[in-house]
Image (cartoon, coloured by chain):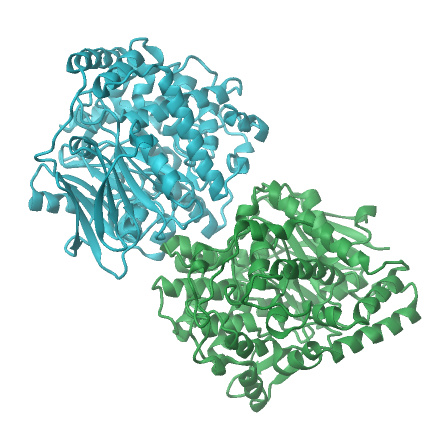
Chain colours: A green, B cyan
Amino acid sequence: MDKIVRVNMSDLTTRMEAVPSEWAGLGGRALTSAIVAAEVIPTCHPLGENNKLVFAPGLLSGTTAANSGRFSAGAKSPLTGTIKESNAGGTAAQMFARLGIKALIIEGLPRGDSWYGLRVNKDGVSIAEETELIGKGNFAVVEALEARLGKKCGVLTIGPAGEMRMLSANISVKDSDSKLRSHGRGGLGAVMGSKRIKFIAIDDSGAAGITLADPEKFKAAARTFARALIEHPATGEGLPTFGTAEMVNIVNAAGGLPTRNFTYGRFEKHENISGETLRDTIIARGGSPKHGCQPGCIIQCSQVYNDKDGKYVTSGFEYETIEMLGANACIGDLDVIARADHLMDDIGVDSIETAVAIGVAMEAGVLPFGDGEGVLRLLREEIGAGTPLGRILGSGAGNVGRAYGVTRVPVVKNQAIPAYDPRSIKGIGITYATSTMGADHTSGYAVGTNLMGVGGGIVDPLKKEGQVELSRHLQIITVMLDSVGLCLFIGFPAADIPTCVPALIDMLNARFGLELTPEWIGGLGVTTLKTERAFNIAAGFTNKDDRLPEFFREPVAPHNAVWDFSGEEIDEFWNF
Amino acid sequence: MDKIVRVNMSDLTTRMEAVPSEWAGLGGRALTSAIVAAEVIPTCHPLGENNKLVFAPGLLSGTTAANSGRFSAGAKSPLTGTIKESNAGGTAAQMFARLGIKALIIEGLPRGDSWYGLRVNKDGVSIAEETELIGKGNFAVVEALEARLGKKCGVLTIGPAGEMRMLSANISVKDSDSKLRSHGRGGLGAVMGSKRIKFIAIDDSGAAGITLADPEKFKAAARTFARALIEHPATGEGLPTFGTAEMVNIVNAAGGLPTRNFTYGRFEKHENISGETLRDTIIARGGSPKHGCQPGCIIQCSQVYNDKDGKYVTSGFEYETIEMLGANACIGDLDVIARADHLMDDIGVDSIETAVAIGVAMEAGVLPFGDGEGVLRLLREEIGAGTPLGRILGSGAGNVGRAYGVTRVPVVKNQAIPAYDPRSIKGIGITYATSTMGADHTSGYAVGTNLMGVGGGIVDPLKKEGQVELSRHLQIITVMLDSVGLCLFIGFPAADIPTCVPALIDMLNARFGLELTPEWIGGLGVTTLKTERAFNIAAGFTNKDDRLPEFFREPVAPHNAVWDFSGEEIDEFWNF
């Protein structure tokens, strides 16, 4: 029997509850957003006692369904002030699912200066004071917990940035290789830090595991589903070969590669940081060009990146990080970016927010564009150490802009705009503007359709026509992916391969003994988006917050494209 | 013939224009707000080329009317994102009025890295490149300009903080003693810095001067008006004797003296920083307990504060600065606070915003509460030098809270709440919440009525009844004061002495040959407040921004008072 587990940090108590009927059919993002909307005062201070931090596995997490191990974290975001869901791979989702934990809700704030660790196992959750690991980086936390609890334990952890309640702090999740994946965006690590929880260790030994209502039907549907993923060119070929960095050359060719803090749309050294170069480098050094962020992944868009001596540097090395440091901060050097990625994972800051913040800091003159060693020094000696400069950078791109009086600050709702210039790829601009989470490419990844004709037909990236409808369609679909526990890239086969969505629905029905239809997807998406939007409106947000920064009205080379959507045109997004 | 003078910093041109008929009857705040609302795109970046900086003298500025020399500066505020008017004493308003300049509008941004100085005289305005004074403090700027242009020149200047576009940067105005008054709030110095204008020098020699439509009527009315000021206990006795610091003991007794970053409502060392102690200290050291911020002031609430050796330290030493450093930052030492006041004036930061930011920084552990020498060091070596810590502090209390993850951050619309706890003095809380400018005690000073029964009858400070109506009444009246060029304290005799307002109206009619009635005041207030509010709404603000921070729901000693207004109750403010 699935349950809700609650932790109250104000009185250090825990309890288990039955799942209320209105949450029974929800998982992942649909569930974290429903809980945050129901239980968090929209106007509360995100780092105060009235915010809650919620974790939930997806509906199919824990099953053998391919790529179903994404884990959702939700809260009111201290970075944006909006509702927030951020999902990640790793092993936690599947462990939670096997333990029958539909959601973990952490509320309140402890009095005093003590830090705590949580332990989740088949008996529920317990709280223990923690001293040894305080101040430690995420990799050290994972190592220490494995030594304490065994190699198989699951881990959610915050680094020094989360302890310092930095607004770009993330929550890291251990993956199958004892490396890290991140609930990156929106500063959820600061919320965990405000509740003085350094880590959550998970032990699923003795767990009841997953019961399937119809195992045979599930098996058949899972096979069809997996086949769709393998057949699609993006999930079956592009991503497994080059990882997400395949986008460097594609986006550069399209003139949408943010360069020098969004001053240009192409980067002369793009080949230095391309997916092709990344793959060649990895193979030459004995790394692995394929790697899954979660057990059961058959796309394997992650990788293991080694240094010149063949020593491990990083994994989960994504396009957005590579692009924003590589082109936008003008550091055309994968080795430097990989070291920065490792440092950001260890300190526990969102690599997108931090990379964009560094671009703004470069424009402010804090360090020169292209100064890779300077960036490594900033990460190690400033952000990681919590110096004043580290505090400025660690509180996100918007705060860097405020501190230095910069006008070219790429944020929406105070969250950094990632590695696609919305002037040249207008569909993603609509997603940045309208997402309930602040600028977030993953909430409706129009780039695939705009640049590659995948995931929803063909929509010209430089024209306004069809972009609002495209973003809306993708945002609704994405809620489903985020709620079922599927990775974002399932969106491509789901849109393009006719057997994919029916198989997905069959899996859900076979798992739970339900009779969902494909319409269920749209209903879940619409309801969840409207719930999230209602939270934001109650928190004080309006259509006026669904806007890109003023500087996007300046043309960007090579197309001299401008952001030319009117407010009214953007607001059409919410007409559903 | 009055004129509008325009400076375009994009192409370094200037021009003079006739006053459009819709602005003919406006002055001061009513005019700056009308111009900003008409000409500034509400959603523009406040430090970008689409913002405008507007200066305007009051309607009676330049005449012999007592206390009519306040000068208004307006723009979209980079601190709050709202429309902003900030007014100050000094000599500029009267010089502008004698030169027949109804408003100076500065628009655009220069290309390149040059800095400029403006010169305003009877022939108009000219722009010249400036190198010598860049990086200099405000006192040095005044000294250098007097050496260049003569002792009588008027000066508007920004310090290093304005050059660095810090969000708490103010614009300083030279007073009759070559000391400084400030357009303190809302970061208008950063707007001037963004336009790369270091100073505006004013020479009114050969000016046409003021023409009175009816000199005899004016003289008689001016005499009646001055008598009202002298007869009222606040303007005739309290303020001239103790300065605004008379409020220390009054507010402490009321339990509304913010102490230790708004943790307590009384300060045990309040006698150390009281108006009585201030006066005794000044007299003992040969300073002056009376001083006017503008020529023609008959209240003289300012002072000249000397150190132990009788050497000048500061003037314009206000209650809010004394309280927020003295009690809220727990530095119970007037000498230290006076030195801090001098430094803030020289660097060019708003002393309220900065003092509140320091309180938040103390809560964050940046330095201990009560560390006066530490505060002086922060001002000199960090804010003045533009170090990262200086950037954090110089960008205001809200940004300090964001950088350090503090939840007790006393701001409304990101502007710091000054020296009156709204839990114990609820009328001022309504003003903080509803002011179109962010938290600002001067926009509707309900403290006088709440604590002393002046300026609007008797309204119990601890009860909700009557506070919304009181604040609305005062905010409407205050627009008139800010537009006529009168100091805020005229609000007391205007409310309490029956001859005061008729005399004021008579002066306006005798000055311009008009037939205004007392109803004109309310009309001007209502129109201007609604214009300002419409700008803010167009910029994205809603009722949800008219709220005090969540922590004011916690009780504060000694009354265990809480901020208990509902949103709906606050929103009643705008029902007019």
- As drawn, is B481 to the left or to the right of A251? left
How many labels were placed on the picture? 0
Foreground pick, A475 / A481: A475
Residue extending farthest bottom: A284
Q: Quadrant of residue B154?
A: top left
In depth, the one of A206 and B465 nearer the eye is: B465
- Looking at the image, residue A32 sits to the left or right of residue B535; the answer is right
> Who is closer to the viewer here, B275 or A356?
A356
Eyeballing the image, is A356 above or below B541? below
The image shows residue B330 at horizontal and vertical percentages of 37, 36
From the viewer's perspective, is residue B494 above or below residue A211?
Answer: above
Residue B219, percent from left and from top = 17, 14
Q: Is residue B244 left or right of residue B255?
A: left
Residue A357, image x, y percentages = 45, 62
Q: Tell me the quarter of the picture where residue A439 sits.
A: bottom right
Q: Is residue B340 above or below residue B319?
A: below
